[in-house]
Every structure is written in structure tokens, then in C-alpha cells.
Amino acid sequence: MESVEQYRNQKVLVLGLAKSGMNAARLLHKLGAFVTVNDKKDFDNNPDAQELLSDGIKVITGGHPLSLLDEDFKVVVKNPGIPYTNPIVAGAIKKGIPVITEVELASQILSGELIGVTGTNGKTTTTTLISMMLNQRQNAGKAYVAGNIGVPASAVAQKALATDTMVTELSSFMLCGIQTLHPHIAVLTNIYSTHLDYHGSRANYVKAKMRITMNQTADDYFVVNWDSEEWRGLSEQSKAQVVPFSRQANSTAGAYEKDGNLYFKDELIMAAKEIKIPGDHNVENALAAIAVAKIEGVPTAGIIQVLKTFSGVRHRTQYVETYEGRQFYNDSKATNIVATEMALKGFNQPVVLLAGGLDRGNTFEKLAPALKAHVKTLIVFGETAQKMADAGKIAGIKEIEFSENCETAVPTAWKLSAPGDIIMLSPACASWDQYPNFEIRGDRYIKAVEDLTGKAEEK
């Protein structure tokens, strides 16, 4: 951990709690700041706020009073999910008070190397693969995962040594709040249209993603998916050395797939079919990780070992169980159409698909081709149930059933399945209509599978 004096005896507002806010508040308190935490949840139902108060940190709960801006705060550290339209955030910006996120704070105290991973889909799997590959190095420091993957970066940065690496998943929400964050290697997995309700437009969303490379120099690396003209064009904004990866062999200057094999430049790494996790999207994730691993000097044998054994990140096309010839998969993290399309394309067997969730106003006609090609039975739930069923009808799916939620959909899926089928939760929607987050939705699905089969989830 680097010695940082810029916050000592300075007033700092931490806006919003959860993991990032808790850890940011504690770190700032440790750095000698006068910390005020503001969270909208009532104090009596807010164990995080109660815990911070017992640690001697000032806590204001039950709303976001604009009077807070009358205090002389040096900086605001906001929860990434709080939009910039929030009155306190907008007011702070108008007053010229810097508004950052917890990952920016973490980067300021990090002694080791920072690798950043962003994109619409594939961030968590790519982040995990990179860290596992880096940990295959001999006589090198430890690689940690952090950020949007569910591990607060400020907690990791405090324990990471100068020889260590923090591989950080960076959401667009996080990247909006950076000023000096400087990854030695930045990765862009892909960019599709999502979170437009937060960013206001696709152009703003893309701009937020590209902040990952804004502080990079010619001594750094920008690893970019080369399979879209748009993404190739975005690489021109970076001052770093561009390293492409391509499933379509659009470039051989980095990592790529050709004739069913994975390469880095001229070196054969392995056959694509040997990757344990299914799907073309996971080939892309593997190629991105290979590019980073090669830049970092990971032996090819270590890369192969990881790709042959890694069985997937929880809630991301996660294999759960096989029972009486049916394979169950949990892809609760598929919160948009593209993610579900990619998951479906990973299977050659017939799929019984469980889908639906929060209604953000869009329809699902774009999903129809993937449904037609891969899905034999569709079970829908949540606010978008009817819209999802309409897409299934367009796709020509004859068996479409409505269910209350993803748990009740499991026994229905079982009854309508046959040996050799894939039963998969891949909602193509956010979870917030029925569940606090996609993790809880996935956990409930797994529990329903366990109740059905009488078998515990494979770890």
C-alpha cells in the first residue's frame, strides 16, 4: 500500500454504502480523513451504517439532504450505481468538488501493477482467467481480482505488495468516476448497447468505457477485440500499444483463432475445443486473457492448464449439475439479449430456456434467431414474460410456458425436457423486478435445481 497524505485532515463525503462504500469509508478513515457517510437507507435497517458509526465514522442516513453540500468537502466518493443526475452529485460537480468512485481511490494507494478489464459482456470471466494465468508464473507476485467482480478494490489495494497485480473488472459506472486511474494493461472485451438509462445515450456509454485507456502511455498496452470495425476504430483513441484479439482471425498481431486453434502471434497455444467452458464468447474471453498473459510473460503451459480446467464463473454459463441425462446451467448474469445469444450459441444440444425479468421497455425480436436455432422449449417469467413469449412465437417455438419466477420454472422445465437436453437459466433481462440482484436470482435457481434433483451443486 502506497503512503497517501492527500486525504489527511480533509473532509470527504462517501455517498452510498454497500461493499464499495463501506471499504472506501474505512480506507479514508485510515488515511486520516474526516469521513461523512450518507446512505438513503434508514439507520435502524442499515447494519453497515451502524457498524461504521461504531468505528467512529460520521453517518447520515434516511435520504440525501442537499444541506450536505454546505460542508467543505474536498472530494465525494460515490457508489457507482448512483447516477450523476442525483442532486448531491450534480450539486458537487457544480461546486467544483471532484466526484470519484472507489476504484479511483484504490488505484491511488496501490503499490503493485493494475490491469483493468471492461466491456459489455465477458468482463468477469476474462478478469478471472487473467488472474489465474498470472498466478501460473513462477517467482512472481500474486494476482488478485477486484472491482465489479464483487471484491472491493480498496480492500485488495491495501494488502497488495509492489510485486503483486490487481486485475480489476471496471464497469462503465466505475469508469465515469476516474481521474488518474492508470492500468498498465487495459482490456476491452466488446461494446454493445446497454445501461442507456444510466448514460443517456450509446455515445456516452462508449465514452465511459473508453476512459479505461485515457491515462495510458506508450509504455502501456490496450488489448482490444478486433472483430468489429467500431472497436478497431476505438483503439485509435489510445496512446498505448494496441494488442488485438480476434476469434475471426481479423488480425494475427495478437491473440486469435484460426482453423479451430488458438494462437498468439505465430505461436500455437491449443485447440479451441479444449477450452472447458462452452461457447464462442468464451473463446473470445480466452483470447483476451491469452493476450494479457503473453504480455506478462506467462508460460504457454500455464495458459493451457487454466483453459483446460477452468469450469466458469458463478452465474455465467455456470455448469450446475447433470441429472437423468439433462445438464443444468446457470447464466443469471445474462442481463441483456447479446449475453443470452452468446450462451445459446455455446450449445449444440436442444435447450430448455428459462428467461425473463425487468422490463426496460425493449422487445426481444432480436433474440428470435438464436431462439429458433437452439431452443426447443421456452419458459418465461417476470415483467417481460409476455414480450419474451412473443419473441418465442416469432422464432416458431411450439412449447412456451409461463411461470411465476425462475424457481418455479425449474420443475416445469424438467417435465418438458428429455435426456440430452440443456436446461438453462439465461434471462436476457436484469433481475430487479423480482430479485435484489442477478446473484440472488442465480442462487435461487441453483437451490431449485438442488431441490428437484436431490443433489448438491458441484463446486
Image (cartoon, rainbow, N blue to C red):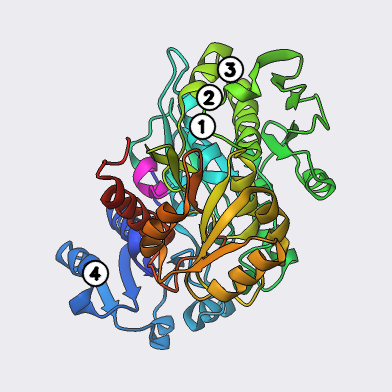
Q: Residue 62's quadrant in the figure?
A: bottom left
**Does dot 3 land on a helix, a strand or a loop?**
loop
Q: Amino acid at mark 3?
A: Gly
Question: Which numbered disc, 1 or 4, marks the residue that appears first in the sequence?
Answer: 4
Disc 2 to disc 3, C-alpha distance:
16 Å
- Marks 2, 3: nearer the viewer: 2
Q: Are marks 3 and 1 in contact (CB under 8 Å)?
A: no
| Rendering coords of residue 93 (x, y %) | 56, 75
* Residue that label 4 marks: 49
Number of other residues with Cα within 10 Å of mark 1, as a class: few under 14, some 14 to 19, many 20 or more = many
Q: Which residue is mark 3?
A: 297
Where residue 228 sits, quadrant-wise, is top right
Dot label at residue 448? none
Question: Residue at label 2?
Answer: 307
Which residue does the numbered mark 1 point to in the structure image? 129
- Magenta region's main secondary structure? helix
- Say few, some or many: other residues with alpha carbon within 10 Å of mark 4 (under 14 / 14 to 19 / 20 or more): many
Q: Marks 3 and 1, how far apart in space? A: 15 Å
The verdict on residue 367 being magenta is no
Q: Which residues are magenta?
A: 150-157
- Horizontal relation, residue 58 to residue 191: left or right: left
Q: For the residues carrying marks 1 and 4, which lies nearer the camera in this image? A: 1
CA–CA distance in space, label 4 to label 2 = 42 Å
Earlier along the polypeptide chain: callout 2 or callout 3?
Answer: 3
Q: Are marks 4 and 2 in contact (CB under 8 Å)?
A: no
Q: Nearer the viewer, mark 3 or mark 1?
A: 1
